Image (cartoon, helix red, strand yellow):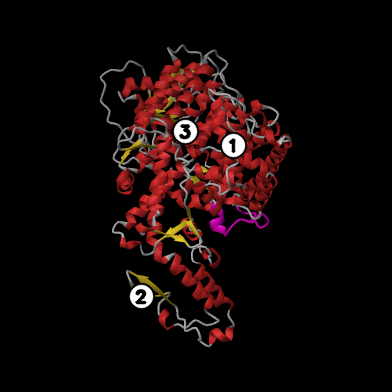
Amino acid sequence: MTPILTPILQQQQQQYRSSSKRKLNDDDENNVSDDDLVYVRMRKQETTKTAVNSWSGGGGCKGGLLKKNSEIHFFIRMMPKGKSVVIHAYAEDTVKSILERLVELNSIPIFEQRLIFRGRQLQWEQTVAQCGIQKDCNVEHVGRMRSTEHPQAWQVVNDMVSVVYDLCRQVNVQEPSKTVKSLLTSYISLALTPKPKLDADSATGYFGIFMNSSAISVLVTLYVSPFKGNKDTADSCIRHFLNCCRTSLSKTFYTQAARVALEFCKLLSRVGTHDPLYLFCRSSLGGFLEDAEISLASSEDQNFKGLVLVQDLFPFVRELADSLLTNLESSIDSPSVACPLLSNIGDFTAFLVPVRNGIEQHQALRGGVSYHNLDSNCLVVKEIEYLHLLYNQLLSKIDTCLQKMEKRFVDKEMVHEENYFFPACSLYLSLLKELHKISKLYDGAPEKLRGVLMRQKTVMCLMVVKYAKRVDEHQWILEHKNVTNFETRRHLAMMIFPEVKEDYEELHEMLIDRSQLLTESFEYIARADPESLRSGLFMEFKNEEATGPGVLREWFLLVCQAIFNQANALFVACPNDRTRFLPNSASKVHPLHLEYFRFCGRVIALALMHKVQVGIVFDRTFFLQLAGNPITLEDIRDADPDLYKSCKQILDMDSDFIDSDALGLTFVREVEELGHRKAVQLCPGGKNIVVNSKNRVKYVDLLIKERFVTSISEQVSHFAKGFADILSCSKLQQFFFRGLEPEDLDYMLRGSEDDISVEDWKAHTEYNGYKETDIQISWFWE
């Protein structure tokens, strides 16, 4: 009985067979070159179990169409000598059954033999009728071709295909799902078997076998089979194979695994784009894309065969975008929409990564993309235009969603209540992150995004504080600081720190002698593995019973007072604010000064991580250096008022007066070091360059740079390294400071300078075990 296929899948199956890797290039069934064959040594058999007749003759087919249950004879030209045998077979006999009969003649293992008819290799599961073999036709018998590098893989796949075809024909197979899964697992195990050279080419070979063997099409055929149990078997087997690819294979194989998932998606999309198995395959494809090799080439370009093409991914982007637009429309009023929206955004993000990378490659080759200046002959021009259109549609839709949210915030005192937020709010942030990335590809797109964020600033800030999590990577919002407030910036900055753990077994324990506070604290913090510090701290003073958050807070305050004590020569205070500090350029008097700066960076980062205000702040010049930003004249006003005043006078001075050299200035700075004065040239040959009206701006800039950057560069660098040691990702050290305003960090380290409002404190106090009217509570407030 032949498999029951839909017309579409019959066409797909024929297409996959015709594209087989093992096909011969010549369409003439008799034109099979000996150079293309690998001959296998045969042993003579004294007798044969099947009667055959030798025949040598032409290659034509005689007779009419082959009818079911009719017996015909045809000829097989045997290798290696070209001797022909006549075969008697029925229309429903399979190629495999014919090969098994040939094994009796030549003793060659069945997996080493192939049959070629009309230039195409015949598949084991095909019947004589399906192959188009008619009376008196000539079929070529060949050995495994040299290009087949993995014969065992071919054997496993062929076995699997045969089992699946048996299921499609309602042949009884014991434990079908287990059998097919076992063969698929064996195939992957073969790919994982250690080889002298396991690389991308090897991966291409293994997955090429899987794709060219019609394995994908027959599994999909099984999925749409009307016979009971076949759909469930195919579903579990396809999921099993793709899951094994994801969990068992190295990323070397992900490009080829993506191609397999892509083919499953193409075939299953005809079943329906809402089909659960199709959605699973689409998500699996998205998971492989992060590490897959993507090409902008056309499908006809042989140089990029075996890669995933950007053009193949755009249908999924369109499909997901349409779903997003639909779900966004109803996301506010229908909480149940959050789940499909979450899945869609995850897949949408996965498919956008290679698409964006492809467009960026195009930009690099063609000097950027302007929406109004695209080369109409470019292979990806339609995709570039479509993504820009999609960007505008999604941005407009999410703008509408945020407007609807804001309308619900009528009672400003209730905006933090749960019922004023929606399950989809966190997903809006994820989608905005993707739109932010797309905006960088098109002229004018960032401005459109910024406009939406500005209009919806209130809602944006509320969503960020409530829904932005450490794993979401929403730091992109800090690139738009003008649409944030302090609470938003602080929340995003704090997410760069690891989360403080409360498990005492994982905390970094310290036992400090108060009389040796700075020295012992240095040993505990500076010598520790950063990973142990990120877990949290447990603090105890020697000979004291108290422990807990209060003791830890006290330790932070005391150790910071010691670090910034000017007697230790590490930092200097600003003249007009003795709690505002910057590194001391003369700190080298301390033998371990650079190690102490790294220690200080760790302490400040830990204080921020534990949300402890230590009562000191950084001067603006110090903050800007940590953020990697330049320092201007206005920035030094607090750090050195005298220098600021002098530089202002030089810049405002009459040109004739300064050109007269009345000031006697050259590009040199006088500094005092260890009791001695020395001249530091601001540039090569600076002592011979006189300051005049034309170069005075440059002089002031170099003077500021030498005073606040060059002279303390080592100190700042070591502090930054210590600070980065505590962050979840050390590369985000500069980003932490760039995302904040200097005043934000002041508030986080020192708190508000305003007096505490007792009435406000009372209004926001919760009582546990007491009532507001209890006498003890009254005493407390008094």
Asked if labels 1 and 3 touch by Cβ distance under 8 angstroms, the answer is no
Q: Amino acid at mark 1?
A: Trp
Amino acid type indicated by mark 3? Met
Q: Which residues are magenta?
A: 360-378
**Numbered mark located on residue 211 in the image:** 3
Which element carries disc 2, helix, strand or loop? strand
38 versus 108 height, above or below = below
Asked if residue 202 lies in the magenta stretch, the reply is no
User: Residue 199 at x, y = what percent?
Assistant: 36, 42
Q: Quadrant of residue 525?
A: top left
Of marks 1 and 2, the one in the foreground: 1
Q: Residue at point 61% right, 45% down?
A: 435
Residue 232 visible in this rendered orientation of the protein:
yes
Front residue of this view, candidates 114 and 399: 399
Q: Residue drawn 70% across and 31% down?
A: 330
Place of residue 440 in the rendered image (x, y in percent of width and height, measured from the top left)? 59, 52
Residue 446 marker: none
Residue 53: x %, y % from top left: 37, 21
Q: Earlier in the sequence, mark 3 or mark 1?
A: 3
Q: Who's the residue at 62% across and 37% down the image? A: 759
Q: Which residue is mark 1?
A: 761
Label 2 sits on what residue type?
Answer: Lys
Q: Nearer the viewer, mark 3 or mark 1?
A: 1
Tell me the quadrant of the picture where the C terminus can be found: top right
Which-is-in-front pick, marks 2 and 3? Answer: 2
Give the distance between the C-alpha atoms of the residues marked 3 and 1, in whole angstroms: 69 Å
Q: Which residue is mark 2?
A: 678
The answer to whether residue 361 is magenta is yes
Q: Position of residue 28 (x, y in %)?
A: 48, 37
Residue 349 against residue 141 in the figure, above or below:
below
- First reached walking from the N terminus: tag 1 or tag 2: 2
